[in-house]
Image: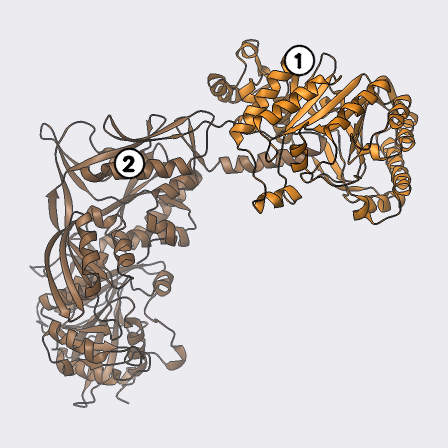
Chain colours: A orange, B brown
């Protein structure tokens, strides 16, 4: 059996940068290049070359998932993204039941784009909803109107997508508990089978961080953010969604297989500037800027910026760090005696599920999920 | 120039006592003693100008940096008097200048017939100088009052001449005026030393008796012992004997310091010099002890010998537990040079393995700690200093408590604590605030005297424990640095004392226990619990912090349980970054100590154990 290799395709462009975002993405103004169509075509040409590089490096492989992330993949012409899927299928074997996800922005996505992508093999849509409350969207510096999300999701359904996910962000400056409940209810009204909910992280160097530093915006405290997580978890569960990772819930069968590949140590190749890859204990990442990336690719240089080969200790740490975030949890047999002893303290404090523990598994309870990083730290020390 | 070439000067072991003058300089730390000493070395020609460096006699880095002298030395200076034209040998015996080393000072004084009272004429006399002056007067030394730094624009020689003349009992015009910096008046001072200080007297044919006034460990030569010969003579290769220990040693080398060591044919009556016997531990050659010869031993020791007695105790712990053996070795090495330092292993549930160390006082403690950190590259936590308590339990059993955690938990009949007589010199403006401070610290006023119109001497009896706890910093900050303090132990007194324990999650944190006066227990409890609430990070459960006297809780704070500690996203590109963060936190975790189930960062211990003044200044000021 040939090896399995998932693909992540990074689309490093956005119409505008959101205030909280520190992703590797660039706006037309920042690129100061030609029009977006030309940019897209050149960029996809480079991406196809990296797929060739992947092929010459890895050889044959079956592809269980492809994920177009960004940036804003829906800014690209659908035909350009279709070229990527086609090239991966030419060089590797994209499995019949492969999951092919597109991140889309409710503002830029069109029914035509969605139909073309569905016909080109895409199976799943992940939409940046973030909130259903205008003043929260404004605090997040998002441009879309809440109703755009509804029409975009409906358009995806009409285009034939059965797997649709939305992202929500909680804990934005000025977001009340009531605001959050509004957003959660609005999401539960949508015809979706997957939802991700992320606590807002203020990354250094973002516009949001500057606004907070200047005192223009104030973040809600940790207690309130914790409360919002519990509100969301309750609402999602009662609507038929189950958590399968800390920040991800799905209806049965709706789990994102691509993301699961990140967490269970599967191999993946990340195509594009700044993208990370992981194959056979080696993790590497590409140069960050799209221009540098394209220059390297077209000169037949490797776009790799740097890499690491994971040691046994690295692997063990990552195992606990990633696996603990999942509903499946960690088999106690995979832990050392000392780790089990430390974990018992968290069982006592109600941070682990009693029932799973009796089945020899470490699974975080709701309160445990809220302090997952703390528990990881205890276990790996 | 009245300097005499060394080779032509009277030689050691062959100098008539009538030609000898032994003197020391009594001065406060920054009143210019070292600069004056430098100047004397230059003018008498024992150090050539090209070899001169600042604070020539202060050997340790710490001494030079802090401008204080910890260990004394003796320098032989040949001098031809400008008054009678005769040749003399002046032995300048350096004295330590701090309250903790009163005993060492007293031994240095005992080796002299006279003392220069050196006072900065921009500042006036300080409390420790006054204490040492009284000590010199008790020893019947001839005092030569000298005003230094007359070159300074702020100098007020007339004003302080009046102050000094009152203290010494002379006329204001008898005070010499010098500048160690420019050399003005120094030759005259040397002449006056010859003229005023009496020559030493002793029996040259009697059994040898020499006073040890200092003893220093040298890596290459072992212990170097500094002595002043009172009777008889000490010669090379002779067997000598120490009075206090009856230990017998061979004199491998004997000589004088001028200012580098020069071997001699011996030391006769009135002479001052060094002895080397090859011993490696200063405790075998104790300050204050009497040296005699084995074959013709003296019957009686010179008076005044005392065992050094530690007054202040503190636990020293390495921050990195792996450094415990290094700390032990370092203390062993320091003790070779510091007969007053005592220590024994101690285990703290909170801080791990360390040592309970006894010191002469706060400065001594600070110096030892600084040397351990600087010379041995250790990073240490020290517990709050405490004094020695004599506790009588119900039923009459008596206990000596040098560590609050040893304080009996049962009923206590009586507690005795050391008390001191403190002397504070200050401008009169601060009398009120000083008295307020001393009252707060359980002081009893003994008296007050005006040194001059605007300077006052205030005398209090205080528990030593109150001085040990940031008294000096408080005094300095309340008087804008103008007040000076000296104290000497005068015995013990009964105190209404209790032990306050600090509990985390119900477990006593031994490092935070403190013995305090009953009326201050509540304030201490509130201070510590509040501090700890701020310093200890949230845990996965709620942590009560309590202060208790026995089973009675007197103060309480809570650290709330942590609600949220999770990064929301963890996808392909996040994994390496998140793992690296985890690795960094792992490193940080090594600096955490577990108290029961509660994780306390080492920084919290350090911060909680620091006094407020420490926290502001970063370290204890002198």
Residue B415 visible in image: yes
Image quadrant in which you'd find residue A13: top right
**Residue situated in front as seen by the camera: A311 or A97:** A97
Neighbour tally class for label 1: few under 14, some 14-19, many 20 plus, Cα within 10 Å: few
Check if mark 1 and mark 2 are on a common chain: no
Residue placed at 72% from the left, 11% from the top? A252
In the image, taking residue B255 as reference, residue B143 lies left or right, namely: left
The label number, if any, that marks residue B525 in the structure image: 2
Which residue corresponds to mark 1? A239
Chain letter of disc 1 in the image: A
Residue placed at 20% from the left, 87% from the top? B81
Q: Position of residue B140 (x, y in %)?
A: 9, 70
Image quadrant holding the C terminus of chain B, namely bottom left
Q: Is residue B374 above or below residue A346?
A: below
**Residue situated in front as seen by the camera: A146 or A117:** A146
Q: CA distance from mark 1 to mark 2?
A: 52 Å
Chain letter of disc 2 in the image: B
**Residue situated in front as seen by the camera: B290 or A312:** A312
Residue placed at 14% from the left, 69% from the top? B451
Q: Are marks 1 and 2 in contact (CB under 8 Å)?
A: no
In the image, taking residue B590 as reference, residue A155 lies left or right, namely: right
Q: Position of residue B582 (x, y in %)?
A: 58, 34
**Residue situated in front as seen by the camera: B63 or A353:** A353
In the image, taking residue B587 as reference, residue B254 lies left or right, namely: left
The label number, if any, that marks residue B472 in the structure image: none
In the image, taking residue A65 as reference, residue B203 lies left or right, namely: left
Q: Secondary structure at mark 1?
A: loop
Image quadrant in which you'd find residue B292: bottom left
Neighbour tally class for label 2: few under 14, some 14-19, many 20 plus, Cα within 10 Å: many
């Amino acid at each position: 059996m040939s090896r399995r290799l998932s693909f992540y395709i990074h689309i490093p462009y956005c119409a505008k940068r959101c205030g909280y975002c520190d992703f590797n993405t660039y706006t037309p103004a920042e690129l100061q290049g030609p029009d977006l169509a030309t940019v897209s075509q050149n960029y996809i040409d480079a991406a196809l070359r990296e797929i060739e590089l992947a092929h010459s490096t890895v050889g044959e492989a079956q592809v269980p998932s492809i994920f177009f992330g960004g940036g804003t993949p829906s800014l690209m012409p659908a035909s350009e993204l279709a070229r990527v899927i086609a090239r991966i299928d030419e060089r590797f074997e994209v499995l019949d039941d492969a999951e092919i996800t597109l991140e889309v922005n409710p503002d830029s996505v069109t029914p035509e784009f969605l139909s073309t992508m569905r016909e080109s093999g895409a199976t799943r849509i992940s939409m940046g909803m973030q909130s259903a409350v205008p003043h929260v969207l404004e605090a997040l510096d998002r441009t879309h109107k809440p109703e755009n999300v509804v029409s975009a999701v409906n358009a995806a359904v009409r285009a034939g997508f059965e797997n649709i996910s939305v992202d929500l962000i909680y804990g934005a400056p000025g977001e009340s508990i009531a605001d959050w409940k509004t957003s959660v209810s609005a999401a539960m009204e949508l015809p979706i089978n997957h939802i991700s909910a992320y606590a807002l992280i203020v990354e250094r160097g973002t516009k949001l961080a500057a606004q907070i530093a200047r005192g223009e915006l104030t973040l809600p405290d940790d207690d309130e953010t914790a409360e919002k997580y519990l509100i969301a978890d309750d609402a999602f569960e009662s609507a038929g969604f189950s958590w399968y990772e800390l920040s991800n819930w799905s209806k049965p069968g709706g789990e994102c297989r691509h993301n699961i590949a990140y967490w269970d140590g599967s191999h993946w190749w990340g195509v594009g500037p700044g993208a990370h890859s992981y194959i056979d204990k080696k993790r590497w990442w590409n140069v960050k800027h799209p221009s540098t990336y394209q220059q390297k690719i077209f000169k037949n240089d490797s776009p790799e910026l740097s890499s690491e080969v994971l040691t046994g200790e690295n692997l063990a740490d990552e195992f606990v760090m990633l696996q603990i975030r999942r509903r499946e949890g960690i088999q106690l047999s995979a832990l050392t005696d000392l780790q089990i002893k430390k974990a018992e303290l968290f069982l006592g404090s109600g941070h682990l599920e009693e029932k799973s523990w009796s089945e020899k598994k470490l699974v975080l309870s709701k309160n445990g999920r809220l302090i997952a990083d703390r528990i990881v730290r205890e276990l790996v020390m | 120039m009245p300097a005499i070439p060394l080779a032509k000067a009277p030689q050691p072991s062959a100098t008539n006592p009538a030609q000898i003058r032994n003197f020391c300089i009594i001065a406060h730390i920054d009143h210019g003693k070292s600069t004056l000493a430098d100047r004397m070395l230059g003018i008498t020609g024992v150090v050539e100008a090209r070899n001169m460096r600042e604070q020539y006699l202060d050997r340790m880095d710490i001494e030079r940096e802090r401008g204080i002298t910890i260990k004394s030395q003796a320098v032989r200076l040949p001098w031809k008097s400008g008054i009678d034209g005769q040749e003399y040998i002046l032995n300048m015996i350096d004295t330590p200048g701090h309250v903790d080393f009163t005993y060492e000072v007293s031994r240095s004084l005992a080796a002299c017939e006279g003392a220069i009272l050196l006072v900065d004429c921009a500042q006036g006399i300080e409390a420790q100088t006054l204490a040492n002056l009284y000590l010199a007067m008790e020893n019947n030394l001839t005092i030569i009052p000298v005003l230094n730094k007359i070159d300074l624009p702020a100098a007020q020689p007339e004003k302080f001449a009046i102050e000094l003349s009152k203290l010494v009992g002379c006329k204001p015009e008898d005070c010499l005026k010098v500048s160690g910096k420019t050399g003005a008046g120094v030759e005259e001072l040397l002449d006056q030393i010859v003229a005023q200080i009496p020559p030493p007297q002793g029996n040259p044919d009697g059994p040898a008796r020499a006073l040890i006034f200092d003893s220093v460990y040298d890596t290459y030569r072992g212990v170097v012992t500094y002595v002043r010969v009172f009777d008889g003579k000490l010669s090379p290769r002779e067997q000598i004997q120490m009075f206090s220990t009856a230990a017998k040693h061979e004199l491998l080398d004997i000589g004088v310091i001028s200012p580098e060591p020069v071997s001699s044919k011996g030391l006769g009556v009135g002479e001052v010099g060094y002895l080397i016997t090859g011993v490696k531990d200063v405790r075998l050659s104790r300050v204050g002890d009497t040296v005699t010869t084995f074959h013709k031993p003296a019957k009686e020791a010179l008076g005044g010998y005392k065992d050094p007695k530690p007054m202040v105790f503190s636990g020293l712990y390495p921050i990195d537990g792996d450094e415990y053996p290094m700390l032990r070795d370092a203390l062993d090495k320091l003790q070779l040079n510091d007969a007053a330092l005592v220590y024994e292993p101690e285990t703290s549930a909170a801080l791990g393995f360390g040592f309970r160390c006894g010191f002469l006082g706060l400065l001594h403690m600070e110096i030892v700690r600084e040397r351990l950190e600087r010379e041995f590259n250790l990073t240490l936590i020290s517990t709050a200093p405490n004094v020695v308590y004599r506790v009588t339990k119900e039923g009459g059993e008596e206990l000596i408590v040098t560590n609050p955690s040893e304080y009996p938990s049962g009923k206590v009949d009586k507690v005795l604590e050391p008390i001191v007589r403190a002397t504070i010199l200050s401008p009169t403006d601060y009398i009120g605030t000083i008295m307020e401070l001393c009252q707060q610290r359980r002081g009893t006023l003994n008296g007050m005297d005006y040194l001059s119109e605007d300077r006052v001497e205030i005398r209090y009896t205080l528990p030593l424990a109150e001085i040990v706890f940031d008294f000096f910093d408080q005094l300095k900050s309340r008087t804008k640095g103008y007040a000076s303090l000296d104290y000497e132990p005068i015995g013990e007194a009964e105190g209404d004392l209790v032990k306050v324990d600090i509990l985390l999650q119900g477990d006593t944190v031994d490092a935070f226990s403190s013995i305090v006066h009953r009326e201050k227990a509540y304030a201490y409890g509130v201070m510590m619990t509040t501090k700890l609430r701020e310093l200890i990070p949230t845990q996965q459960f709620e942590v009560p912090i309590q202060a208790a006297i026995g089973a009675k809780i007197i103060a309480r704070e809570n650290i709330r349980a942590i609600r949220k500690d999770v990064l929301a996203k963890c996808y392909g590109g996040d994994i390496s970054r998140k793992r690296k963060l985890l690795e960094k936190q792992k490193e940080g975790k090594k600096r955490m100590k577990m108290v029961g189930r509660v994780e306390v960062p080492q920084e919290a211990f350090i911060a909680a154990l620091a006094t407020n003044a420490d926290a502001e200044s970063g370290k204890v000021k002198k």
